[in-house]
Amino acid sequence: MTLSMKKFLTCIFIVPLLVGLAKAQTWSETTSGTRTRTTAQGTTTTSFKTRISGDTTTVVKDSTGVRIPYKVWHEKILSGGYMLHTMSMPADTGREYTLVKMTNRDLERMRLLGPPPDESGMIRTGEKLNLFKIRDIDGMTINPKDLAGKVVVLNFWFIACAPCMAEMPELNKIRMSFAADTNVVFIAIATDKQDALRDFLKDHPFTYRVVANGKNYASLYGIKAFPTNIVLDKQGRVVFHAPGYGPIYPVWIKEAITKASQSD
């Protein structure tokens, strides 16, 4: 075989390989992370871009090709730092996914992308959100007049909500990072009854001001997915609103609070 023929055959094999790699890289770049939330229909996990279905029928495997039970991979995603990855193209049917641990690059890309839009009910980014006079489980009144000129952080949750439990330690860290700032107020509105909340919080401390019996408040704002986190600036306008929980959500929440705190 001549040298020129060898070069020609080499090109034939290399070009398809490069094309395949380019497709795989392009698709993997569009995978931007997962979001888990609970509704009346149950808990689901989705991807911001690919809309991966997070139910028990989804085929998820590890790096060796062994299928992972739903309970195992779902708990990994809830714990943060993992995502479902696919090398298939969006139009493919019967896709299979691989559970992969997020790299620092993945997390940074998600941070820059920002949370997926989910405008619903009375909540609209940039608009003022009307607050109501309520009491926390310690019997202390939370009056909207007292919140004027302050950054208000709201969290809607309930005890049996898995993603709500997953984000709670991260929310506590955020609360502690602003502990010295009296102009930032953290309020957690739970749909559970007060007695149940008191028992639960004995073993699962939540440093927000916790409000019980919050179903009516959630309904007033059109909130149907849990958890839902909202950040209001000093003028009471919505600067952050996102239902569900993902590993990068605490970063977005903290950034929104910091930005709102620094604005006039």
Image (tube, grey):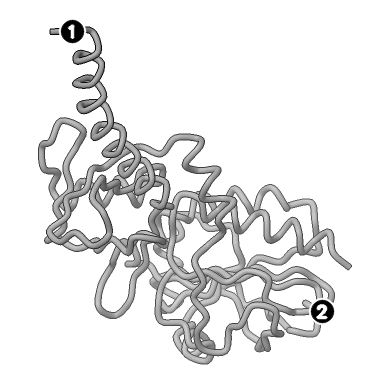
- Mark 2 = which residue? 148
Amino acid type of the residue tagged 2 in the rendering: Ala
Q: Quadrant of the C terminus?
A: bottom right
Query: Contact, CB < 8 Å: mark 1 with mark 2?
Result: no
In the rendered image, which quarter is residue 133 located in?
bottom right
Determine if residue 92 is in view: yes
Circle 2 packing at 10 Å, graded few (<14), some (14-19), many (20+), is some
Residue 56 locus on image (x, y percent):
14, 60
- Mark 1 = which residue? 2
Residue 11 locus on image (x, y percent):
26, 24
Viewer-nearest of discs 1 and 2: 1
Q: Earlier in the sequence, mark 1 or mark 2?
A: 1
Tell me if residue 165 comes above or below residue 42 in the rendering: above
Amino acid type of the residue tagged 1 in the rendering: Thr
In the image, taking residue 176 as reference, residue 137 lies left or right, namely: left
Residue 18 locus on image (x, y percent):
31, 33
- The structure residue drawn at horizontal position 84% and vertical position 64%, both measured from the top left corner, is 263
Q: Secondary structure at mark 1?
A: loop
Determine if residue 154 is in view: no
Q: Nearer the viewer, residue 161 or 13?
A: 13
Q: Nearer the viewer, residue 189 or 221?
A: 221
Q: Nearer the viewer, residue 94 or 42?
A: 94
Residue 17 locus on image (x, y percent):
25, 31
Q: How far apart are labels 1 and 2 at the CA level?
A: 83 Å
Q: Secondary structure at mark 2?
A: loop
In the rendered image, which quarter is residue 163 located in?
bottom left
